């Protein structure tokens, strides 16, 4: 055993050999300084044969370069975790073959020197079972395919019956799919209502109780404070209910758009005025310029809803002391609205779901919200021939771009 563990050699050996998984300890240069019996047997080496060897001896040659990158990244972070998550890892046996492994890395320090302990598990049996399961699944699919082919041959001779059954099956699938979607939406809706309604209602109740305690005339300021809280909470709940109604109308196709000609600046001024009420400390909005003479023929309420939603999100998901750029550009096709923030951004893996109803990105779950605002905005815009797109980088910010085509006046 190297000098590394000389002082506590007996205790270390007992703990080391008690572990059923393979244990390998390397220094900062990836030189092996200790292994347990399970590791020696797993890789086919005798006791102490691996000591002073480079870790690459246990890694298939074609993985050396990749492993070096993994190790360097881990060594800089120096925190316990699994290695190569979501990637296949292999160990190299002394006899020359490779086998699948699972590796956990745990850094530790002795005498101001950093070492890394690797817990190695041979998952050959697990991988073989997975392959067997896949083979069985493929075999099952083949059998299903064969049975389906035979069934199609049989029903081909019964054309009318085939058509009736096909139509019935199609309708049934649609009904089952619709029922499944409704059940999923119902579950999400109940969860959302429970979460989003409970907190504001608790705030209303607490404020109402406190208002009742301030009975003296000179306590009007305190009463006003709690009455304002009640007003804001009720306004928030009213907004949620309006969102639910919008979803229902979009779903049923009962939306009646009111197209009219109005000054673009009228809507922009109102949207920005309301947004300013929500600004955090040090936040500010860079207003669009040269829009006073621009007229728009569109649904005024839908445009206001769209821009308000995007501005409020930019404010909500951005930290203090940041700016929000709001730009408007007129083209031959219509108007382009761009709202850019320097907020928390949208994780890449969540971006494909961002317009789905009730969906909320994993880094936004602690903020209030229903997850239906963008879904509603996208639905209205598409009904009116518009589009909404975005670019986002996590922890750097998000830019939403709305394109509103010109609509011919009737």
Image (spheres, rainbow, N blue to C red):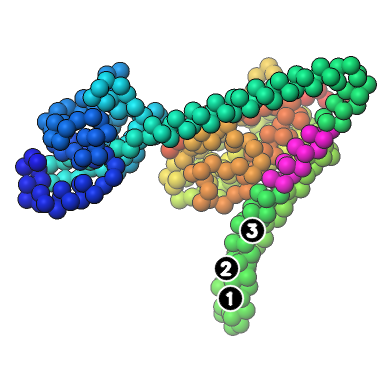
Q: In the rendered image of this protein, does residue 160 appear above or below residue 203?
A: above
Residue at numbered disc 3: 194
Rendering quarter of residue 308 = top right
Which residue is at the front of the view, 273 or 147?
147
Q: CA distance from mark 2 to mark 1?
A: 10 Å
Residue, x 29% and y 45% (percent of image)? 20
Q: Quadrant of the N terminus?
A: top left
Q: Residue furthest right?
A: 160
| Label 3 secondary element | helix
Residue 48 picture location, percent across and down: 13, 35
| Label 2 secondary element | helix
- Disc sitting over residue 210 in the figure: 1
Q: Describe residue 354's horizontal placement relative to residue 112 as left or right.
A: right
Query: Mark 1 and mark 3 in contact (Cβ < 8 Å)?
Result: no
Q: Describe residue 276's horizontal placement relative to residue 70 as left or right.
A: right
In magenta, the rendered stretch is 171-185
Residue 135 picture location, percent across and down: 55, 26
Residue, x 27% and y 34% (percent of image)? 42
Which comes before the other along the chain, label 2 or label 1? 1
Q: Describe residue 318's horizontal placement relative to residue 175 as left or right.
A: left
| Label 1 secondary element | helix
Discs 3/1, front: 3
Residue at numbered disc 2: 225
Residue 342 picture location, percent across and down: 46, 37
Which residue is at the front of the view, 28 or 390?
28
């Amino acid at each position: 055993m190297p000098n590394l563990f000389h002082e506590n050699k007996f205790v270390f050996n007992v703990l080391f050999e008690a572990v059923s998984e393979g244990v390998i300890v390397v220094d900062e240069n990836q030189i092996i300084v200790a292994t347990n019996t399970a590791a020696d047997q797993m890789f086919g080496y005798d006791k102490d044969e691996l000591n002073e060897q480079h870790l690459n001896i246990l890694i298939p040659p074609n993985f050396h370069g990749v492993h070096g990158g993994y190790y360097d990244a881990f060594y800089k972070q120096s925190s316990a975790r699994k290695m190569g998550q979501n990637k296949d890892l292999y160990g190299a046996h002394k006899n020359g073959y490779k086998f699948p492994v699972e590796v956990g890395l745990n850094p530790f320090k002795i005498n101001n020197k950093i070492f890394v302990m690797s817990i190695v598990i041979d998952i050959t049996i697990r991988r073989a079972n997975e392959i067997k399961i896949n083979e069985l699944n493929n075999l099952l699919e083949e059998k299903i395919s064969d049975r389906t082919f035979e069934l199609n041959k049989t029903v081909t001779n019964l054309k009318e019956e085939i058509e009736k059954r096909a139509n019935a099956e199609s309708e049934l699938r649609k009904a089952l799919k619709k029922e499944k979607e409704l059940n999923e939406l119902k579950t999400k809706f109940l969860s959302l209502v429970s979460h989003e309604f409970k907190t504001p209602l608790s705030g209303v109740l607490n404020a109402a109780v406190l208002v009742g305690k301030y009975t003296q005339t000179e306590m009007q300021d305190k009463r006003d404070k709690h009455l304002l809280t009640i007003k804001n909470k009720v306004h928030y709940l009213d907004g949620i209910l309006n969102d639910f109604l919008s979803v229902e109308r979009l779903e049923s196709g009962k939306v009646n758009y009111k197209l009219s000609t109005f000054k673009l600046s009228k809507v922009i001024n109102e949207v920005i005025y309301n947004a300013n009420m929500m600004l955090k400390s040090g936040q500010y909005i860079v207003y669009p310029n040269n829009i006073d003479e621009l007229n728009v023929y569109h649904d005024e309420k839908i445009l206001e809803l769209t821009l308000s939603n995007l501005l409020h999100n930019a404010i909500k998901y951005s930290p203090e002391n940041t700016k929000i750029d709001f730009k408007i550009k007129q083209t031959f096709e219509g108007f382009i609205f761009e709202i850019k923030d320097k907020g928390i951004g949208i994780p890449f893996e969540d971006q494909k779901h961002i317009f789905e109803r009730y969906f909320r990105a994993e880094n936004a779950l602690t903020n209030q919200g229903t997850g239906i605002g963008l879904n509603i905005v996208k639905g209205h815009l598409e009904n009116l021939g518009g589009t909404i797109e975005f670019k986002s980088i996590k922890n750097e910010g998000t830019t939403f771009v709305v394109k509103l085509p010109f609509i011919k006046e009737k």
